Image: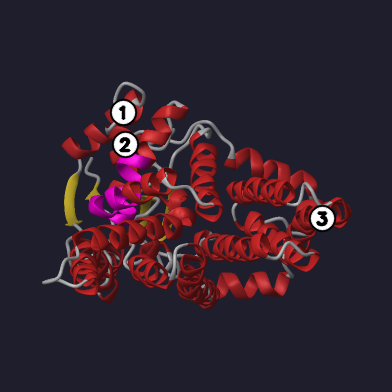
Amino acid sequence: MFFHPDPNLRVAFEANPNEFYLLGRLLTIIYAVISVPLVYRLGKEVFGRRVGLIGAWLFVLSPLAVAHARLVRTDSAATFYGLLSLWLGMKLYDRPRMAWHIVTGLAIGLAVATRYFMIALAVVLLAMDSLIFWKHRFSKSSQGPLLLSICAGFAAIVFGFAISTPYFFLDFGTAMQSLKVEARSTHLGADGLSPMGNLWFYISQAMPSAMTWPNVLLAAVGLLSTLWKPRPKRILLVGFVGIFLGGISLSPLHWHRWIIPIIPVLVLFAAHALDRIAAFLSFPILSGRAALAGLVLLASAWPLGRTALIGIQGLNPTTRVLAREWILANIPPGSRIAQEAYAAPLGGTDYIVFEQFSLATGRTLEDYYREGYRYLVLSSAVYRRYLAEPDRCKTEVEFYQALFARAKLLQEFRPSNLRGGPVVRIYELGE
């Protein structure tokens, strides 16, 4: 945050944050929902109506995009403004007028404001303008107005970013501090890979978790098909995927969620592959439409199952909520509880709660006991990161091993196909 809210608003948030989070979740869901027709429009513009429809359907079934659309994050907003920028850019390619340059630039500025990695769209716009300028290279009379339109488009990027993120400039020091945090080189569980290692992580892990392996392979076929018979608009989409992946791979960190803005483009290439394969398989007994329908059903089965499980899990309390309910029912009010991040939400209770990212950081079991903390609540979203790198985190691993061996496990809550959340463990310290 680059601003300081009104004190009364802060008091209202601290008293009842649920309403604020609900508004944030509704906004992210709205962004995700209105992205679906944009996937169709972009697919129709670049590949045709059938590919647009199939791509929109496959995007709806993306487990990673669906899961993050329910969280108060900027991933859905980045996806929407990225799609809007690409769709407007395709219109711009056919009608290189100043108005299209300006609206495309504004959309790119809004996309960059949501996720800085979306600056890849500006590179795509530069490539698009280069193609447009090359097409008009023999028209001397149109080159001057075209150059002016191109400059207006890039100025609109800066303007769109500025009007949506004014405090980036008004409180530049805080903005730079926030950027330094985002650009940090270490984060347990998300660092330690080279740029090529990051790229392989996105291809071999993040994409399959977002689309499932069959659709990743289909997207690869669609990309190869596009490169085999290149067309300007399709090559621009390939360029966006490549530039975006290259940009996030240069970061010292890697996260599954960072690929969400390119999922709509990847599913369009998967849909293009399905369309091409159906045309190849069609013969007099089996029509092309029947072949395509069968292929789409096959491609939908795995992601549909995973997305349905996400919905079912959303209907049931998570492991974190169950842990909270158990603590309220079994641990005396006023008790001192120390817990990690991603454990039981204990805000608004009568307990004296100490919480930090990892309980193993800077303290021992004796420290907690001496300070009066008899109950420790752990989350696998935290402790497994340390246990996975014992050579790097010797002190923390020793803490967890001592805790597992010496403390009494009161209750454990595990996720399942019907219930989401991390493993949450509640321990009691003895003397």
Q: Distance between the residues labelled 3 and 1?
A: 55 Å
Mark 1 closeness class: few <14, some 14–19, many ≥20 residues within 10 Å:
some
Callout in the foreground (3, 1): 3
Mark 1 vs 2, N-terminal side: 2
Task: Residue 424 in the image: state x and y as whole percent.
Answer: 26, 54
Is label 3 in contact with label 1 (beta carbons under 8 Å)? Answer: no
Mark 2 closeness class: few <14, some 14–19, many ≥20 residues within 10 Å:
some
Asked if residue 426 can be seen in this view, the reply is no
Q: Quadrant location of the N terminus?
A: bottom right
Q: Distance between the residues labelled 1 and 2?
A: 21 Å
Task: Residue 342 in the image: state x and y as whole percent.
Answer: 37, 54
Judging by the rendered image, the residue that carries numbered circle 3 is 146
Judging by the rendered image, the residue that carries numbered circle 1 is 389
Q: Which amino acid does label 3 sit on?
A: Leu
Q: What residue type is labelled 1?
A: Glu
Q: For the point 44% across and 39% down, which residue is it? A: 254
Q: What stretch is highlighted in magenta?
A: 203-219
Report the disc number at residue 234: none
Tell me the element at label 2. helix
Judging by the rendered image, the residue that carries numbered circle 2 is 365
Q: For the point 30% across and 40% down, which residue is it? A: 204
Mark 3 vs 1, N-terminal side: 3
Mark 3 closeness class: few <14, some 14–19, many ≥20 residues within 10 Å:
some
Q: How far apart are marks 2 and 3 (CA)?
A: 69 Å
Q: In this view, does 244 lie to the left or right of 220?
A: right
Tell me the element at label 1. loop
- Of the pair 107 and 277, the residue shown nearer to us: 277
